[in-house]
Amino acid sequence: MTVDAYATAFKAMGIEKVKTFLKTHPELKVFLVFENENQELETLSLNNFPE
């Protein structure tokens, strides 16, 4: 249930704000799939999420 709340919040925040938020929450391991400004899919691993 908590993961759904984070997913919703991260979608509303945008990538840069998510990165800033995660600097103060190292316990959260995050893998994002998002559409960039060129409408291409990108992935991003944050806080040592396993690659």
Image (tube, helix red, strand yellow):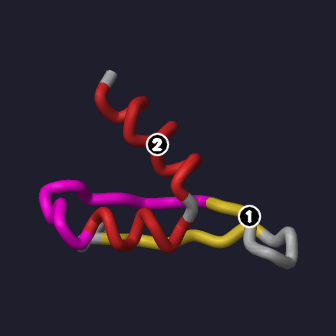
Tell me if 23 is positioned left or right of 20 in this view. Answer: left
Task: Mark 1 vs mark 2: give the one in front.
Answer: 2
Point out which mark residue 49 bears: none
Q: Evaluate if marks 1 and 2 touch, with contact meaning CB atoms under 8 Å apart.
A: no
Q: Quadrant of residue 49?
A: bottom left
**Residue 42 in which image quadrant:** bottom right
Residue at the spot 29% in from the left edge and 68% down from the top edge: 50
Q: Which of these two is toward me, 5 or 46?
A: 5
Disc tally is 2
Quadrant showing the C terminus: bottom left
- Crowding at dot 1, Cα within 10 Å, few <14 / some 14-19 / many 20+, comes out as few
Q: Is residue 13 above or below residue 17?
A: above
Q: Which residue is mark 1?
A: 35
Residue at 59% across, 59% down: 33
Residue extending furthest top? Answer: 1
Residue pictured at 33% horizontal, 21% vertical = 1
Name which residue type carries label 1. Glu
**Residue closest to the eye, 38 or 42:** 38
Which stretch is magenta?
A: 23-33
Q: Amino acid at mark 2?
A: Ala
Numbered circle sitting on residue 9: 2
- Judged left or right of residue 33, residue 1 is left
The CA distance from mark 1 to mark 2 is 16 Å
Residue 19: % across, % down:
39, 71
Residue 44, x across and y down, in percent: 49, 72
Return the residue found at the far left.
27
Q: Position of residue 45 (x, y in %)?
A: 41, 71
Q: Is residue 43 left or right of residue 51?
A: right
In the rendered image, residue 5 lying in the magenta stretch gets the answer: no
